[in-house]
Image (tube, rainbow, N blue to C red):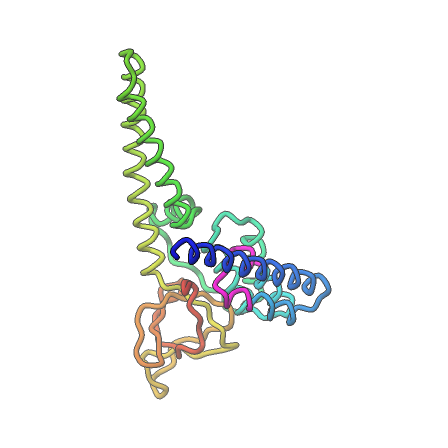
Amino acid sequence: MKKLLFLLLIITNAVIAQNANELFNSANDLYKNDKFNEAIELYKKIEAKSLVSSELYYNLGNSYYKLNKVGPSVYYFEKALILNPLNEDVLNNLIFAKRLALDNIEELPKTVFQKFNINYLQKLSYNQWSMVLIGFAFLASLLFLLYYFSHTPSRKRFFFVTSLLSLIFLAITLIITINQYSFFINNKEAIVFAEKTEVRNAPTLNSEEVFTLHEGTKVIVLDAIDNWKKIKIADGKLGWIISDEIKLLNDF
């Protein structure tokens, strides 16, 4: 019975994957024929099946960019980068999409560690770092076994040193993976979808307006009360915005 259920699961997953590939190819054909709205509908059907990928979000970003919809375009390019931070095509197109945004916010100076984290550690997602972690774990285990079963002193010394080095790199990678996962979970970024919105100093409509944001701007969500979210923008300014006017990026 268990074997039958397992076989049915494999067949079901294969059918779903095949249907998703057919939808993806059909959506790509529509995109090539400048039918961007129709292409978006098919891409979103794939997204609804939770069969997401960097390529899917990249194509969604391109489709919205062709329609001059800044918020959705930036949003999907950013989501594509979360899954694959090394995707050069996404990075380049995101630059073009951000140029359509009206807000030009000057970022606060970053510390040396923040610069190192952005320029190097965040080049891989936490999922990719976990794969590196598994690789070092496998390598350390293999080298230890070679050390254990080696008989000549020179080989034992070599495998002992290399296995020790692998364990050190394993520990470092584990720390990086945990930190990147913690950053992903706690750093709740969002994109403004409203064409124009007023950010207030309190979560009420009659509170004072502190600054204005436009479609496509990235914000960090710090807190939530009812239908309001407390946000911070790149220059350090804080305020409250209506929840429906932004969309969270890390909502996988």
- Where does the image place residue 202, in percent across and percent down from the top left? 31, 80
Instruction: Indicate the quadrant where residue 43 lies.
Output: bottom right
Task: Look at the picture and state if 115 lies above or below 187.
Answer: above
Which sits in the foreground, 161 or 99? 161
Residue at 44% of width from left, 46% of height from top?
123
Quadrant in the rendering for residue 26 = bottom right
In the image, residue 41 lies at what x, y percent?
60, 71
Judge whether residue 95 is colored magenta.
no
Which residue does the image show at 55% across and 59% down from the upper left? 15
Asked whether 52 falls inside the magenta stretch, the response is yes
* Prevailing SS of the magenta stretch: helix
Q: Quadrant of the N terminus?
A: bottom left
Q: Is residue 122 left or right of residue 150?
A: right
Task: Examine the rendered structure and indicate whether residue 26 appears above or below residue 196.
Answer: above
Q: Quadrant of the C terminus?
A: bottom left
The image shows residue 122 at horizontal and vertical percentages of 41, 48
Farthest residue in the front direction? Answer: 1
Question: Who's the residue at 62% across and 65% down the image?
Answer: 63
Residue lying furthest right: 33
Q: Nearer the viewer, residue 236 or 47?
A: 47
- The picture places residue 111, in percent across and down from the top left corner, at 33, 49
Q: Which residues are magenta?
A: 45-58
33 lies left or right of 205: right
